[in-house]
Amino acid sequence: MELWIEESRQRCLQQGLDPTTIPVPGLTLTAKQLQEEKHKYRKILVVTNYFAEKLLAFLSGTPHLIVVTNDTGYILDNYGDETMKSTINRLGIQEGIKCDEEFMGTNVVALALLEQKPIQIIGKEHYHKMLEESACYCVPFHFSNFHNLSGAISIMTSVEHHHPTYLALLTNMVDSIERELSLRLANHNQSLIQQLVVNNMRNGIIMTDERGIITEFNAYAEKITGRNRKSVTGTPVFPFEHFGSYFYQALKYRKQSENIELTFRYSLDQENVCLFDVLPILNEQGELLGAFAQFRDITDRVILERQWINSEKFSAIGKLAAGLAHEIRNPLTAIIGFFQLSKQSNDPSKLWSYVHLIETELQSMKQLVSDFVVMAKPSTPERKAVNMQEFLKDTVRFMDSQAILKNTSITAIMDNALTVAMIDPSQIKQVLINLIQNAIESIGKNGTIQLSAELSHDHHSFRISIEDNGIGMTKEELDQILNPFFTTKENGLGLGLSICYRIIENHKGTITATSRKGYGTRFEVTLPLD
């Protein structure tokens, strides 16, 4: 038996405590005093509860009771086996009583606080005989970095479950509690610094708890939303028209949203445009704590972009008008000339030839205007289920004769997995014919053109590529091929690829090109399957 236990037993004997009677607590806190002590130790009790649950789970299968006391030995909280709780409650050992030696006899709490060291009392080492079936362990704590608070944490179990590692477990638990409290204190200090940053930053910040109740709403958020911080703090975030649904998705489905463009309009001529991000806040265990959102004001950038786009639009309109005027002027000049010649001639055969030439030029102008309209606003695709294998074979067969005239061969490589797609067959055929025609015209003689089609890995889209070994294009030419009226052909109008681009765009697809001067060109068309 340890010396300090024997000395305690002697003191109890000298005080006249009867070891055969039930020990009765002599000192008890009032309800108010207990509440005040619990409040003072509240953060310690929260952390202790967390680690106590972990320790009890580790020791599951055997009855245990964990008790937390303050620096003078008053019980503040207890956790564990309900049967043991009921037993000690019948002895009057409950929250608010003091585990002192004078009334309770030799006990681990009083000795641990007195000696300021881990203490264990096993079985008959207890002064009172009714506790001889118990094994008790206690470790004192002193958290100097956390309000300088002291106290003790104890474990009680039966003698048959006694093991020398209990004190080590309890000591590790106290060390873990101290580290966690230090971490929380550091986090609290960091939170204060963060609060200063949040309130003075140039981004709008909104934070909520796990229920969507607003806990933080900084000054810039007030400016952007036009809402007062005091009026919205403590209220749900979901009713906000612009971003409430994004918070709901973050909290309900833990979905993160980024770079959502939101426009806050205050009057006809005043608005704020922001990029909005929201993400769920999770702790280390993956538990939802709330949501965090920020607004980045991009109003100035948007205004500059609009000005630049308007400038580009007017520039494009000017280029289109100049191109169209140039292309229309040539046939108009010819028509006017033929009219003047017809006035001066009385020969019927010449008159008919002039009329025929005028009609040809007018048809050319009509086609030019039609192509321009299609390029500017092609008709809405009339999608239908198309067998892509047959569709692509028919397109290749249609262009074979033109390729043969230049001793050029067209080969097709098709993915058997690509079967049916929802497309407008006439519009997509127009695109493919245009691309194959361009490839044929870029080849001198004895060239090759390869058309390949394959399904994407996710089966949501498919790709058609057309590759030739023709003259190719320079980087400067490649950068301009989609511009209306730009052409590398002597007699071309430069509308073909622009029309192709608009058709593919209306199909929600993409068209890209790569080329190298002297080596050939490759076009890729990607389209959704449905």
Image (cartoon, grey):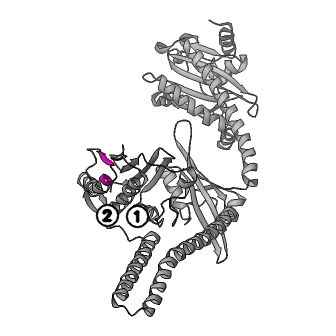
Q: Are the residues flagged by discs 2 and 1 in contact, CB closer than 8 Å?
A: yes
Say the numbered circle drawn on residue 424.
Answer: 2
Q: Residue at x 51, y 20 (%)?
A: 157
The residues bearing labels 2 and 1 have C-alpha atoms spaced at a distance of 10 Å
Residue appearing at x 25%, y 58% in the figure = 386
Relative side of 63 to 199, left or right: left
Q: Give the left or right position of residue 114, taking residue 515 as reference.
A: right
Work out which quarter of the rendered image holds the N terminus and state it.
top right
Magenta stretch containing residue 381, yes or no?
Answer: no
Q: Nearer the viewer, residue 159 or 249?
A: 249
Q: Secondary structure at mark 2?
A: loop
Marker disc for residue 50: none
Q: Earlier in the sequence, mark 2 or mark 1?
A: 2
Q: Residues within 10 Å of mark 1 (few under 14, many from 20)?
A: many
* Magenta stretch, residue numbers: 403-414
Would you place residue 214 above or below residue 267 in this image?
A: above
Where residue 206 sits in the image (x, y, percent)?
63, 55
Q: Residue at x 61, y 72 (%)?
A: 314
Residue type of the residue flagged with mark 1:
Ile
Q: Is residue 370 above or below residue 388?
A: below
Please give left or right for residue 35 compared with residue 252 in the image.
right
Residue 164 percent coordinates (x, y)? 55, 11
Image quadrant in which you'd find residue 400:
bottom left
Q: Is residue 249 left or right of residue 267?
A: left
Q: Nearer the viewer, residue 166 or 226?
A: 226
Closer to the camera, 349 or 433?
A: 349
Q: Label 1, on which residue? A: 503
Residue 93: in sight, yes or no? no
